[in-house]
Image (spheres, rainbow, N blue to C red):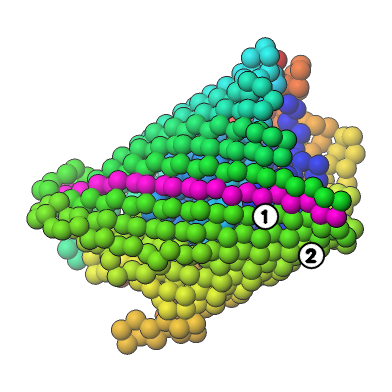
Amino acid sequence: MKDRIVTLTDSSDVIITAFEMNRRQESVAASVQSLNIQTLQKNGVTNIVDAINTLPGVIMEERSPGSYRINIRGSALRAPFGVRNTKLLYNNYSLTDAGGDAYLNQLDFRMFDDIEVLKSIGGSVYGAGIGGSLLLNSGPNYEQFTMNAGISFGSFNTKDAYVKLGIPNEQKNLTQRFFASHFETDGWRDHTAMKRQVLNWELNYQPNKKQRLQATVIGGKHFYETPGGLTREQFVANARQARPAAGIFPSAEAANAFIEREMVFAGISHALQITPNFKNTTSVSGTMGWFENPNIRLYEKRLEPFASFKTVFENNFKHSNYGMQWHYGVEYIAGKYQNQTYENINGSKGVFLSQDDLNNSMLTAFVQGNITLKHDWQILLANSFNKVAFNHQVVFPEMNGTIKKRYDAEWVPKVSVLKSFGTLHWFVSYSKGFSSPTTSEVLIGNASFNEHLQAQYADMFEGGIKQRGNGFYWSAIAFLTNGKHTIVQGRDGAGRETYMNSGSTKQLGIELNLNYKITESKDYLLQMQTSYTFSDFKYDDYTVNENNFSGSLMPGVPKHRTYFGIYQRLRDKLDINMTAYLNGKLMLNDGNTAFADGYALINLYVAYNFLLRNNSFLKLYCSVNNVLNQTYSLGNDINAVGNRFYNAAPKRQVNIGLQLNLVK
């Protein structure tokens, strides 16, 4: 396949699979956007963060190299790190465990051919959750042998190498994919070294026209040092430093604070076309995770296994006046976790302090109907039944009885309507959301179980307009989310994350997006993209002890965000992509007494393609991140004890690399 740059303005290529719709983006009655591999790479060859941040309503943060956090319409309020309250799926396998946690940072984005970001409440087919969904897809089968490989070197002793193979058989009904990558960096800040290795194998087999078998295995090891947050004074004086010692607690470097996680995932799915209008897809998968985290307080060690089963039936009905597509099924996810804590002796385990065992499960039964009517009307009706349970037991130092926590069974409906007027598409939707506390929020270490934490709820009202024309695509979407028992994070006197329910919240947002081909010819392409996000997120009713935070802005989300990018391609050889991100000031605590300054970030990517035979090519590229050499914080610690909110992002960073794409 030729490395033609395909972006959202190419209407023939943007097919949204969210909600099982398989429709072009403008025809989906929801806030969904797609990024393909070419768009991902030209926004940062070794890092997914910059590409995700081109989307309105979505913020991807990196507190230190490899420590990702996804914030979809304010969802990261309860996530000190990782992906929480957001459903993460890879080829429709759940990478989110029964407790609602997922580790996006263990994957390499070059495994994917595209990413779909669902910003509205998923509900229905995606079960419990309020913070949207990320759908990671590895793409269609290869029809010929392909190899994509690359190597790069950059600032802060950054090294990266990967290889991706697609191997079909002679009959073209079986394809295997192999992927391997290694990435490492010393990081810009002190104590921010990171290493990640990823292996992936996939099998797609279609023995006949009615059946398809798919299998996936992923293995990975991820290590990164955690430098800790700084106070504003420390950040201004020397943003590069790791957290210094404070009181009885050592510095991050003295504690040798790091996170290391190994993971093995395996899944298999089978699709059967039972009749021309009736289909079933069933999948099973399992994940085993080994997690270690020495920090300034303790040394934590966890086993994190979970398994998933999902079966979905599809019925299609066609009539002269309407068409209907129904999906209904069941998903069950169960985990069995073990959490041990030790004294931390400079990054090594000391005295054994405690062990907690936790079993959890999530059951979702769902039904969804996509109805197409005359006069270009589309209606989506969906509902799901969700049941979440935890069983917790302290094993050491003294075994206690099992604490059983059951959350009320919840129905999560979703209704959306879309009306098309030629190329103009209007939609409105309503979604109810339910999100139980995650494993990390109820199991907070050292024999502590947060059994009083309640599930959070939300009602989201959304409306918008989309249009695609000759060389352009634009959308304007507004939403209002009313939250109840919203889970927020704080920190205790020892710096340990704590979680509580905040009463009620109101989140009003506007998201604008424009993609436009300014000029296109055989030898030259000039294209621009811009987006703007307005976020007015406030606590409606929130009191902690004697502190009333009602009316305060919710921390962690700037009120204004703007992105602008311009891309040029000359004679299929020279690529130039320049992007600018403008982030407004954001609050860092519930009382709005601390804030992070706004910043302007400019990145540049230049590549030259040496065209070879059979649509093969060799690419030489250079990327410069943070061209203006700004000092800013990307991934702040919310409500941090001692006002240690700030995690400085890298200063100017240069990467140079080679990429080879062979097709036979």
Q: Earlier in the sequence, mark 1 or mark 2?
A: 1
Q: Amino acid at mark 1?
A: Gly
Q: Amino acid at mark 2?
A: Trp
Q: How many marks?
A: 2
Mark 1: give few (<14), some (14-19) or many (20+) Cα within 10 Å: many
Do callouts 1 and 2 mark residues in contact (Cβ within 8 Å)? no
- Displayed quadrant of residue 44: top right
Q: Nearer the viewer, residue 534 or 385?
A: 385
Residue drawn at x 58%, y 60% is: 383
Residue drawn at x 54%, y 58% is: 384
Residue 369: numbered disc: 1
The magenta stretch spans which residues? 321-345
Q: Is residue 3 highlighted in magenta? A: no
Cα distance between the residues tagged 1 and 2 = 19 Å
Q: Measured along the vertical axis of the image, is residue 10 above or below residue 356?
A: above
Q: Nearer the viewer, mark 1 or mark 2?
A: 1
Looking at the figure, which quarter contains the C terminus?
Answer: top right
Let me know if residue 654 appears in the view.
no
User: Would you name the residue on which mark 2 appears?
Assistant: 426
Tell me if 516 is positioned left or right of 258 in this view.
right
